[in-house]
Image (spheres, rainbow, N blue to C red):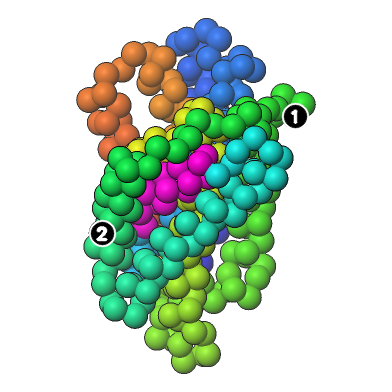
Amino acid sequence: MKTNPGSRRLMLLALVVLVMIGGQLAVPGFTNLGQLGNQLKIATFLGLFGISQTLVMMAGNQGLDLSVGAAATLGGIFGAALIGTEPAGLLCAVIAAALCGALVGGLNGVGITFLRVPPLVMTLAMASLVDGGLIVWSSVMHVNTAASPALVALAGRSVAGVPTVALLWLLAATMMWWFLDHSAWGRRLMATGANSTAALLTGTRVRVVRMAAYTASGMIAALTGLLLVGYVGQAFLGLGTSYVLTSVVVAVIGGVSLGGGRGDYIAVAIAAVFLTVLTSLLTALQIGEAGRQCIFGATLLAFLVVNGWSLSGGRIKAA
């Protein structure tokens, strides 16, 4: 039974507001426009990686994509190497990054759907293969890894005070919301994750749906990696590694079911903002790494409990 996503969104929005108010009281200037703009940029990348995890988690079969960091690094390095100085170079870089991500995601999909390798094992193995290949390739080939002026402008420019990357995220979030709530493919994805046997009996091509989910996950991660190069100014090994677990965390906090078939990307997007603001506050308060990890762990555990209650309540009503 699908739960109402509105309560989750309101709860997360309330938490964002509370953290921002607490941050302003504890650290004056925490909510000034410059700080908010920077936090929005950081949340954008986390939110985009969250799209990748949302797709594969909703496809069911205990889906997780631990290769999103490797796909982002691959797309970022190849995109930076190909972009050049000509305006057409940006388009070439985008196409190259998308193809790299599609290759990683497609191989994940083949291993998971046809070879029946567990998603956790398959995506972790793929991440190791990609990272290892990049280490060998970078030691042999010496290519440009610096972000081009066009890519820096794309990642750093603002429109009416709103970062361009945040506007791109808004567009991606709108498309994701429409896909999940209003498209036939979105309904097939939900049905596949909820009960793959029932979906198969109703004519859904379960393997194709899961293949598409993992392919899309890889593409989105690789394109996000290219944007990340423009933000940090340089492509490097391990570019997307720090987003692997955090992307899973924001999906869980946003209410995406680890069992598949249930989730709301708008809540995931708000969760990305919440986690970013919380991290920024803890950093401003000079909380050590151990303290931050404890707080993040407690937050994740609390939302896992909330998810369990929500799912249990849905089943009781359905009964």
Q: Main SS of the magenta segment?
A: helix
Identify whether 207 is placed above or below 89.
below
Foreground: 44 or 294? 44
> What is the number of the mark on residue 159?
1
Percent from the top left, x then y, of residue 39?
54, 26
Identify whether 295 is placed above or below 7.
above
* Mark 2 residue type: Ala
Residue at image point 32% right, 34% down: 296
Residue at image point 33% right, 72% down: 112
Residue extent of the magenta highlight: 65-81
Percent from the top left, x then y, of residue 67?
35, 54
- Asked which secondary structure carries label 1, the reply is strand
Spatial CA span between label 1 and label 2: 41 Å
Residue at image point 43% right, 28% down: 278
Total label count?
A: 2
Crowdedness near tag 2: few (<14), some (14–19) or many (≥20) residues, C-alpha within 10 Å? some
Foreground: 312 or 254? 254
Percent from the top left, x then y, of residue 87?
71, 40
Percent from the top left, x then y, of residue 121?
24, 62
- Asked which secondary structure carries label 2, the reply is helix
Mark 1 or mark 2, whichever is nearer to me: 2
Position of residue 190 in the picture relative to residue 181 (left or right): left
Task: Say if the magenta span includes residue 55.
Answer: no
Foreground: 232 or 146? 146
| Residue sticking out furthest to the top | 28
- Earlier-in-chain disc, 1 versus 2: 2
Position of residue 23 in the picture relative to residue 246 (left or right): right
Asked if residue 16 can be seen in this view, the reply is: no
